């Protein structure tokens, strides 16, 4: 084995281990507060907060609040108002996630990336009876994206690597866009192998992914999971 190969293997191992560590920490946190958190981010109050802050760009609002609080605290170190302003920063920060349904098989949308809303898909096998629920969630996503003036609505997941799944999602998105009279361009990219850190991050879910039907998940030439991006661009 050449030095280049040894270095590549070392980087791969470090990246995988770091990703798995991150995933493990998040998984542990979810076991502790997951049920309460899942309930909270699916409440009507959270929906209003998510849409309100996302409409004016939640990322910029959060950064502005953090900058204002930091400057005020620096200029007035003994003021109690500085502490209150730091707490206010938490409001747009916690509003960046919204779960479309309180049950497990639900999409989660985030506004952490400003005008690009990103969607996390549930790691469940799609049954015929679930198609109606999927369409209802996609309809709500399209409505939220339209109201929030999103530029893009992005899905990127190993669960979309199978052509049948990504095609089903693309059709549901096209139908939802038509229902809200939104002019969109839907792009379905070819599957790409995830990086080492992402592969480590996703490895903790492999046991659950393994329960899905054959052919839904695909591995690349380096053994990493393949992921496909489906993106809705609003005109």
Image (spheres, helix red, strand yellow):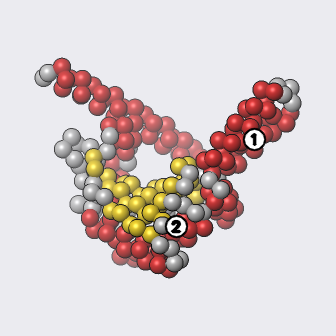
**Visible in this render: residue 131?**
yes
Q: Is residue 101 visible?
A: no
Residue drawn where x is 37% and y is 60% of the image: 230
**Residue 3 percent coordinates (x, y):** 18, 19
Q: Secondary structure at mark 2?
A: helix
* Residue behind mark 1: 87
x then y, percent, for residue 227: 32, 52
Q: Which mark is residue 123?
A: none
Nearest to the observer: residue 115 or residue 169: 115
Name the N-terminal-most of marks 2 and 1: 1
Q: Secondary structure at mark 1?
A: helix
Looking at the rendering, in which quadrant would you find the N terminus?
Answer: top left
150 relative to 93, above or below? below
Residue denoted by label 2: 141
Q: Residue at x 29, y 31 (%)?
A: 12
Say which of 209 and 1 sits in front: 1
Label 1 crowd bin: few (<14), some (14–19), many (20+), radius 10 Å: few
The crowd level at tag 2 (other Cα within 10 Å; few <14, some 14-19, many 20+) is: many
Q: Position of residue 122 (x, y in %)?
A: 43, 59
CA separation in Å, label 2 and label 1? 29 Å
Count of marks overlaid on the render:
2
At x 70% / y 36%, what residue is drawn? 67
């Amino acid at each position: 084995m050449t030095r280049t190969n040894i270095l590549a293997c070392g980087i791969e191992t470090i990246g995988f281990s770091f990703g798995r560590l991150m995933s493990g920490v998040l998984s542990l946190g979810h076991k502790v507060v997951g049920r309460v958190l899942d309930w909270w981010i699916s409440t009507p109050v959270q929906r209003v907060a998510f849409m309100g802050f996302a409409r004016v760009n939640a990322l910029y609002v959060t950064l502005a609040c953090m900058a204002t609080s930091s400057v005020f605290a620096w200029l007035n170190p003994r003021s109690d108002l500085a502490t209150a302003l730091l707490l206010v920063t938490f409001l747009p920060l916690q509003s960046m996630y919204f779960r479309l349904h309180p049950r497990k098989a639900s999409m989660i949308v985030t506004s952490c990336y400003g005008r690009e809303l990103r969607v996390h898909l549930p790691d469940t096998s799609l049954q015929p009876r679930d198609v109606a629920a999927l369409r209802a969630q996609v309809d709500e996503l399209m409505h939220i994206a339209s109201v929030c003036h999103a530029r893009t609505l992005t899905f990127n997941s190993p669960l979309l690597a199978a052509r049948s799944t990504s095609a089903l999602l693309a059709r549901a998105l096209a139908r939802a866009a038509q229902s809200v009279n939104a002019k969109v361009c839907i792009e379905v990219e070819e599957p790409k192998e995830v990086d080492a850190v992402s592969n480590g991050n996703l490895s903790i879910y492999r046991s659950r992914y393994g329960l899905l039907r054959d052919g839904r998940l695909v591995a690349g030439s380096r053994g990493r999971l393949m992921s496909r991006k489906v993106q809705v661009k609003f005109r």
